[in-house]
Amino acid sequence: MRLPADVPVVDGIPYARGGRDELRTRVCDLLADGDVDAARTALLADADDWWTEPAPPPQQLARVPAATTLREAMELLGMGRVGDYFAHRWSDPTHLAGLALLQQHWPGGRPVVDVACGIGTHLRELARRGCTDLVGSDVVWAKLWLARRFVCPEARYVCADVAAGPDLGTDLGTDLGVARPAYVMCHDAFYFFRDKPAAARAMRALAGPGGTVVVGHAHVADRVSAGEPLPPDAYADLLRDPDGGAEPLLYDDAELTAALVERRPPRPAAAADLAGSEAIALVAGDPRGPAPADLGEPLGPLAPNPLYADGRLVWPSERYAREYGPRSPLPETWPDPLPADAARRRILVDLPERW
Ligand SMILES: C[S@@+](CC[C@H](N)C(=O)[O-])C[C@H]1O[C@@H](n2cnc3c(N)ncnc32)[C@H](O)[C@@H]1O
């Protein structure tokens, strides 16, 4: 990886977020003084523009590297509802919809860039299923730190804003050594981007000619989360290759989740038929082919889903229940005996080793 001198690197993760010159300079100065711990603490305090809580005090953030589990680290980072969401990502219907997309449009041997990868949940699945050239990017450095430490150490990471400079699609992509054609994915995040045309341009450039851009769980009508949703045809317009090529494939997100649980290929739909969907997915460029393995069956070792307490399904919060409850394949009570599809429905889950 060759990066410009003004992009500081701490714990192997470059901080190239646009619009944060003051923090970037401060971290470079701390590194020049040899104070890596203070540089890390400064980066761990940086959040995305949608986050409304204040950062925890520096003394608390300084304890994050000593955390022995993902959840302990998220607690110290003060991640609140976002921590709940990431802790239980393995069984939520939105994550399963992302797996269904990968199942039907598998990157194969192509390099993969997961834009807005969060804590690297999908990257972990890709790494465990044999993909070797993986890059994760997110605007929040702390999430990449969690990904590298607890979820998918096999990937390379870069902190960058996909819709602001330096351009992930050209300069940074080259600096990171992403070969083209690439498979660029962005799950449950595209609707957050304020400058969606810039994000779509960067993702297409990163994929290169003959590459693939997959946008999963793009909100059409937003009931719970923050963000700025668009109608299906507007998403399709943004992702369509301006130089021609095939129309993007579109899916209803609920159909993707159902297809994974029912072990069948998802049915694509026309934009006009998706106007009433909560969220959709789009595949632009080379659609690739189905995965050789069944991503519906999680890889072991499997553990009882920690959302069950005393035999009952307990959602982490009211908000979580509203967002994921209606589409969840989890039963209200722990089934005894376990059904044959317990793992497929994520009653049993494959948590990271240091969950
Ligand atoms: C709902 S999470 C999804 C994370 C991950 N893709 C997943 O499916 O688990 C949305 C992510 O988008 C990231 N994000 C928001 N705006 C961004 C931007 N402009 N550039 C890059 N990442 C961004 C957030 O930090 C967050 O990790």
Image (cartoon, rainbow, N blue to C red):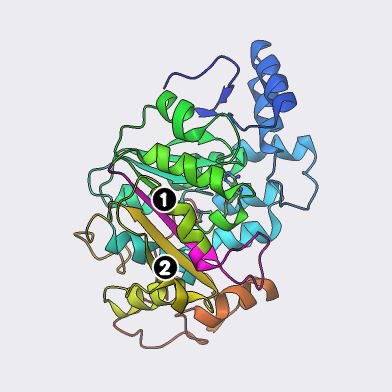
Task: For mark 1, give the secondary structure.
Answer: strand
Q: Residues within 10 Å of mark 1 (few under 14, many from 20)?
A: many
Is residue 279 at all visible to an observer of this figure?
Answer: yes
Identity, as a three-letter code, of the amino acid under mark 2 = Ala
Tally of numbered tags? 2
Residue 264 coordinates in the image, percent (x, y)? 26, 76
The answer to which of marks 2 and 1 sits earlier in the sequence is: 2
Asked if the magenta segment contains residue 131, the reply would be no
Against 5, is 142 above or below?
Answer: below
Q: Which quarter shows the N terminus? A: top left
Residue 139 coordinates in the image, percent (x, y)? 60, 41
Identity, as a three-letter code, of the amino acid under mark 1 = Met
Quadrant of res 98: bottom left
Task: For mark 2, give the secondary structure.
Answer: helix
Region rendered in magenta:
210-233
What label sits on residue 119 in the rendered view? none
Residue occupying the far front of the picture: 243
User: Residue at label 1?
Assistant: 185
Q: Is residue 332 left or right of residue 155?
A: right
Against 263, is 336 above or below?
Answer: below
Asked if the magenta segment contains residue 225, the reply would be yes
What label sits on residue 97 in the rendered view? 2
Identity of the residue drawn at 33% across and 65% down: 298
